[in-house]
């Protein structure tokens, strides 16, 4: 069976190298943050965002316990404020929309902040960079976020960016993801 999280990482690794910059736009418990840190290595940097203090504390503890290289900045703020903190091109960005695993399911990402966060991420995306956006349509806001992103991303100029959706067709409420790749020669 297809493992969407492993596929997510596969695509990221096609673009992200040691020394690069990356952003985890939805920190959660820090698993994507750790993956990005290990991929950029000692000479790269990762910024990770979450609005919930619980996520920042959980991520800090998980990163310390795992012996992850300390090449990260954990930010307790909304992902749509990324440009207040990141002013360099990024080679990769990861979004895991929805709610904090193990947290309050009433607190989710919202279209009102996800759209500006994705737009900012696209502005920061370096040539040959990638964004991976995991969408969780099993709840109303997640389904609406996915539709909104598909509509917006389908309008991007194909000569500059390629937006692809990967989805399990016979399971419509299962998570799926969207990758957006910036061409290397742009």
Image (cartoon, rainbow, N blue to C red):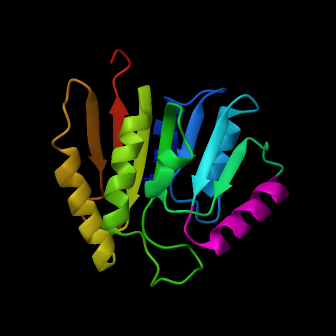
Magenta residue check for 58: yes
Left or right: residue 30 compared with residue 70: left
Answer yes or no: is residue 84 visible. yes
- Asked if residue 164 is positioned above or below residue 126 in the image, the reply reads below
Total residue callouts: 0
Q: Find residue 62 and report its horizontal and vertical position in percent.
A: 76, 61
- Taking the spot 34% from the left edge, 23% from the top edge, the residue there is 183
Q: Find residue 38 and report its horizontal and vertical position in percent.
A: 70, 40
- Taking the spot 46% from the left edge, 37% from the top edge, the residue there is 11
Residue extent of the magenta highlight: 50-66
- Taking the spot 58% from the left edge, 59% from the top edge, the residue there is 27
- Asked if residue 104 is positioned above or below residue 53 in the image, the reply reads below
Answer yes or no: is residue 3 visible. no
Left or right: residue 149 compared with residue 64: left
Residue in the foreground of this view, choosing between 106 and 165: 106
Quadrant of the snapshot with the N terminus: bottom left
Q: Find residue 7 and report its horizontal and vertical position in percent.
A: 46, 45
């Amino acid at each position: 069976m297809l493992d969407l999280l492993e596929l997510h990482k596969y695509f990221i690794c096609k673009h992200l190298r040691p020394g690069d910059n990356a952003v985890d736009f939805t920190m959660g418990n820090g698993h994507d943050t750790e993956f990005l840190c290990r991929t950029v290595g000692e000479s790269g940097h990762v910024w990770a965002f979450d609005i919930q203090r619980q996520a920042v504390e959980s991520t800090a503890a998980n990163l310390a316990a795992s012996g992850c290289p300390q090449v990260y900045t954990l930010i307790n703020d909304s992902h749509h404020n990324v440009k207040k903190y990141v002013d360099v091109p990024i080679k990769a960005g990861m979004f895991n929309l929805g709610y904090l695993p193990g947290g309050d399911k009433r607190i989710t990402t919202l279209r009102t902040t996800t759209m500006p966060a994705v737009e900012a991420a696209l502005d920061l995306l370096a040539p040959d960079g990638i964004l991976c956006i995991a969408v969780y349509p099993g709840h109303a806001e997640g389904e609406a976020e996915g539709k909104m992103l598909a509509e917006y991303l389908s309008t991007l100029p194909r000569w500059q960016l390629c937006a692809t959706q990967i989805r399990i067709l016979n399971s419509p409420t299962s998570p799926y993801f969207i990758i957006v790749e910036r061409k290397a020669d742009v």
